[in-house]
Image (spheres, helix red, strand yellow):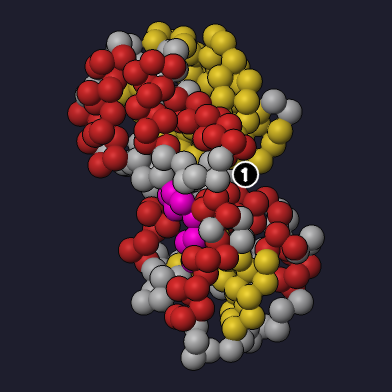
């Protein structure tokens, strides 16, 4: 038996429709499809699935974020798989080389010892990254558009318009493992557990989510005008932006605090938090207790 816990709300409500591909992949197996949005206690649910059965989470990055926070304190005693149904699928972009022929990735290693963000009284683990600045602005603007229309949201267009007109750069203080740095005209100040955010932008090309010490990457885009940042922006999709050393910097660390001089939206694995002036991240410490991810 394969238990597929799926999110029908993934990809702006297209999760149920996109699930048809997976149903065809599993047509020769006994499979049960369960809406993860209707499971009130995911740890209890997993504990009561027969040991011989497989479990797969199907959804987007937000679904994975909810999953890893809902199972806080519960260590799965079985392999847990993931199947992408989201719009951005940044987690899958980062690990797809380890997917099997049906598109499943074993995620046990990836959901253990995750970093924690503290922001506006909220404490959550995250699986991909924290976007602060233009990325948070894009999520906030995307949410606004969703409330007005059911049309598919193009975050790249929102980002370009924001960089060209609407988003105003801030001043930032970024502290990484006790070392404080100040920046002017900041457009981005994310902290990354994986390489990708924003639906395929490789903002942290040297980040390894399974590095032995579980450190994260603090990145910053700063110090230039709108035209210059717009010129460099396309290079982020391939991780080539790092060659612009006067515009982009990054640092590895375990304790990171980012402060802006005015409230700005932030996103946690694609979920928006508005009105943020400061966030802190505490990374994992290298606890590794499973080897099912293929690495």
Position of residue 57 relative to residue 52, above or below, is above
Drawn side of residue 48 relative to residue 149, left or right: right
Q: Residue tagged by mark 1?
A: 125
Locate the N terminus by quadrant. Answer: bottom right
* Whether residue 178 can be seen here: no
Q: Secondary structure at mark 1?
A: strand
Q: Quadrant of residue 207?
A: top left
Task: Check residue 40 for magenta coloring.
Answer: no
Locate the C terminus by quadrant. Answer: bottom left
The image position of residue 223, as x and y in percent, is: 33, 11
At a point 64% along the width and 80% down the height, the residue shown is 32
Position of residue 214 relative to residue 23, above or below, is above
Position of residue 48 relative to residue 189, above or below, is below
The image position of residue 226, as x and y in percent, is: 31, 14
Q: Quadrant of residue 55?
A: bottom right
Crowd rating for badge 1 (residues with CA inside 10 Å; few <14, some 14–19, many 20+)? many
Q: Name the residue nearer the viewer: 79 or 198.
A: 198
At a point 45% along the width and 67% down the height, the residue shown is 105
Drawn side of residue 55 relative to residue 135, left or right: right
| Region in magenta | 83-91
At a point 46% along the width and 81% down the height, the residue shown is 24
The image position of residue 233, as x and y in percent, is: 28, 28
Drawn side of residue 64 relative to residue 222, left or right: right
Q: Name the residue nearer the viewer: 139 or 70.
A: 139
At a point 33% along the width and 63% down the height, the residue shown is 97
């Amino acid at each position: 038996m394969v238990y597929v816990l799926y999110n029908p709300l993934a990809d702006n409500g297209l999760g149920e429709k996109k699930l048809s591909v997976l149903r065809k992949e599993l047509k020769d197996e006994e499979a049960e499809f369960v809406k993860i949005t209707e499971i009130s206690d995911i740890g209890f649910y997993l504990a009561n699935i027969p040991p011989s059965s497989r479990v797969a989470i199907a959804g987007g990055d937000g679904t994975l974020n909810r999953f890893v926070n809902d199972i806080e304190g519960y260590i799965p005693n079985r392999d847990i798989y993931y199947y992408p149904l989201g719009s951005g699928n940044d987690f899958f972009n980062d690990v797809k080389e380890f997917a099997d022929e049906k598109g499943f990735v074993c995620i046990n290693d990836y959901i253990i010892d995750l970093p924690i963000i503290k922001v506006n009284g909220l404490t959550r683990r995250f699986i991909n990254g924290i976007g602060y600045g233009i990325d948070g602005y894009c999520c906030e603007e995307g949410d606004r558009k969703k409330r007005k229309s059911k049309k598919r949201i193009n975050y790249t267009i929102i980002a370009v318009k924001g960089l060209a007109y609407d988003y105003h750069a801030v001043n930032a203080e970024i502290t990484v493992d006790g070392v404080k740095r100040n920046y002017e005209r900041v457009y981005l100040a994310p902290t990354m557990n994986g390489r990708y955010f924003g639906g395929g932008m490789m903002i942290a090309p040297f980040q390894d989510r399974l590095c032995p010490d579980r450190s994260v990457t603090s990145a910053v885009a700063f110090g230039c005008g709108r035209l210059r940042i717009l010129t460099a922006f396309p290079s982020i999709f391939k991780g080539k932006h790092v060659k612009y050393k006067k515009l982009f910097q990054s640092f590895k660390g375990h304790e990171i605090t980012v402060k802006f001089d005015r409230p700005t939206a932030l996103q946690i694995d694609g979920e928006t938090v508005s009105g943020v002036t400061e966030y802190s991240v505490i990374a994992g410490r290298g606890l590794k207790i499973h080897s099912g991810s293929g690495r």
